Amino acid sequence: MQRITTRAEMRAGTLWHRSTYIAVKRTSGALVVHRRADWKDVYAGLWDIAFGGVCDVGEDWAEAAARELGEEAGLVNQDLQFAGRGTYDQPDGRVVGMAYTVVTDDPLQCNDGEVVELAEVAPADLTQWLEAHPVCADSLQIMLPLL
């Protein structure tokens, strides 16, 4: 049985929720990574390999992914490709996630304040980059195997 709760209740109770993950790649193959704002309610200040976030109540997965990509990265009307699904069940969160990829060389505009830094990582450098940066655990578990 599904129960609708507030975001605060979901976070406080570490309740299961739906979330989207969108990997932004360049035509060169580089992955666009970003650092989250220090005020975020989870993974504050950490790096992330995927844009995305919590789905609204009743929101379609692909619509949620497109909305999140627009809010966080300023990328709209992108060709989102379904990459897979996964779950994350740890003390810091419980997520059912749908993952997408988009390939674009469009400039990113992170105007909502959720993203404070961007970088691009070549595929050959990703393992080393991940070892050198604190990265959101849910994205690593759900998105990384799909890249």
Image: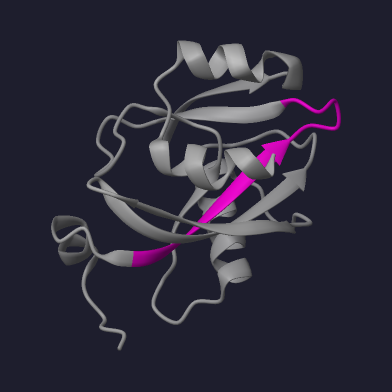
| Residue at 42% from the left image edge and 44% from the top image edge | 138
| Residue at 79% from the left image edge and 40% from the top image edge | 104
**Residue 100: image location, x then y, percent:** 66, 54
Q: Is residue 12 above or below residue 75?
A: below
* Quadrant of res 35: top left
| Quadrant where the N terminus is found in the figure | bottom left
Q: Is residue 112 visible?
A: no
Taking the image as shown, residue 10 lies to the left or right of residue 120, namely left
* Quadrant of res 17: bottom left
Q: Is residue 136 above or below residue 121?
A: below
Taking the image as shown, residue 104 lies to the left or right of residue 100, namely right
**Residue 65: image location, x then y, percent:** 58, 60
**Residue 63: image location, x then y, percent:** 60, 70
| Residue at 58% from the left image edge and 44% from the top image edge | 143
Q: Is residue 9 visible?
A: yes
Residue 86 lies in the magenta stretch: no
Residue 23 lies in the magenta stretch: yes
Q: Which residues are magenta?
A: 17-30
Magenta span: predominant SS is: strand
As drawn, which residue projects farthest toward the right? Answer: 27
| Residue at 59% from the left image edge and 38% from the top image edge | 144
| Quadrant where the C terminus is found in the figure | top right
Q: Please name whichever residue, 97 or 53, is drawn nearer the observer in this view of the structure.
A: 97
Question: Colour scheme used in the picture?
Answer: one colour
Report the number of discs: 0
**Residue 115: image location, x then y, percent:** 45, 34
